[in-house]
Amino acid sequence: MTDAAISLRDLSKTYAGGKQALRGISLDVPRGQIFGLLGPNGAGKSTTINILAGMVNKTGGTAEIWGFDLDRDPRNAKASIGIVPQEILFDPFFTPFETLENQAGLYGVPKAKRRSDALLAAVHLTDKRDAYARSLSGGMKRRLLVAKAMVHSPPVLVLDEPTAGVDVELRQQLWAYVRELNQRGVTVVLTTHYLEEAEELCDRIAIINHGQVIANEPTRALVGMASEKVVEVTVDRDLTVPPAAPCFEKIELKGERTIVITYDKRRVNAGEVLAAVTEAGLGIVDVSTREADLEDVFLNLTRAAA
Ligand SMILES: Nc1ncnc2c1ncn2[C@@H]1O[C@H](COP(=O)(O)OP(=O)(O)OP(=O)(O)O)[C@@H](O)[C@H]1O
């Protein structure tokens, strides 16, 4: 037993048709964090989450949720986790309030301890309390799903691609709520394709590729792993062909006077890159640099492991 919120050891899954979706996933989600699970399509994120949700049976390894082993103590393991699935599935004839009450009933939450109205308020659905679920917008349904996953007050909340297809404003609202829950002590695990969001929101990120963990680091350390940097230089004359230099990994023209240079910060520094521009006979009018972001790291890691 560990004191991690979720602890996976050598978790594997081979589907009935022979597809090996997970090839021995081992990772710990520290308690109290927002943990990101990233990976390209088909990497095994949903399979991992579905195993935790009890919807898919693992074929090897162990999983613990809040210290409870999924095989030996499934009831406590299940009570410790709330899952917001990727797909929106509701009974269209129940209202949001009834949906939450029914779910609380399924989890055996006594009436006196139910918090349906508070949950509806938290996800800004109080004014839809008694509307039919089928009349809710996609975004409202997604918020209701989050509330539904929290009816039994689990210490761990897992969100599978919660903001896919959700507009920017709503995404911000959802993230604000996730942050609020986290501040109140809920450990959050999320899968997302929005790297920027993972970077902004997550304390720690694991990257899965072809059913294996290829990185598992604090977000800052992961972003620091990027070796490429980009510098944008505006020069003093129009160009039709960008200059070349051995220290440039890549160079592109953006408009007539701006060149975008990618360089490897392990090999050269920005001074050398700018000196190469000057040596090409160009005057420098303006410079801006961009730190490599998670996307660069992600592409490098998944490409290297392809
Ligand atoms: N029920 C199933 N039967 C057979 N193969 C499956 C099943 N579910 C998933 N797979 C396969 O297992 C692999 C992992 O899929 P999974 O859905 O876990 O990936 P993912 O990382 O969640 O991707 P996505 O972001 O596209 O949902 C994929 O190759 C997928 O085709």
Image: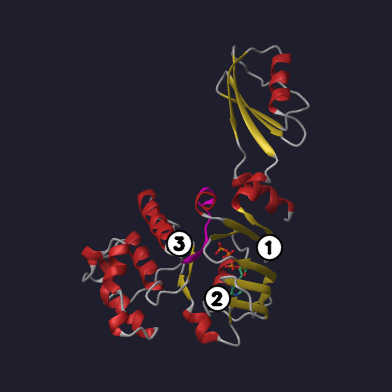
Q: Tally the numbered discs.
A: 3
Q: Is residue 188 magenta?
A: yes
Residue for point 64% across, 12% down: 283
Q: Nearer the viewer, residue 219 or 286?
A: 219
Residue 96: tell me if it is visible. no
Q: Position of residue 290 (x, y in %)?
A: 59, 34
Q: Which label lies toward us, 2 or 1?
A: 2
From the image, tell me which residue sits under label 2. Answer: 66
SS assignment at label 1: strand
Q: How is the image coloured?
A: secondary structure
Q: Would the CB of label 1 be found within 8 Å of ligand 1?
A: no
> In the picture shown, does residue 249 fall above or below 293?
above
Tell me if label 2 and label 1 are in contact, CB under 8 Å.
no
Alpha-carbon span between mark 2 and mark 1: 21 Å
SS at circle 2:
loop
Q: Label 2 amino acid?
A: Trp
Among the two numbered marks 3 and 1 on one chain, the one whose residue lies closer to the N terminus: 3
Q: Which mark is residue 182?
A: 3
Which quarter of the picture shows residue 14?
bottom right
Give, as a three-letter code, the residue at label 3.
Asn
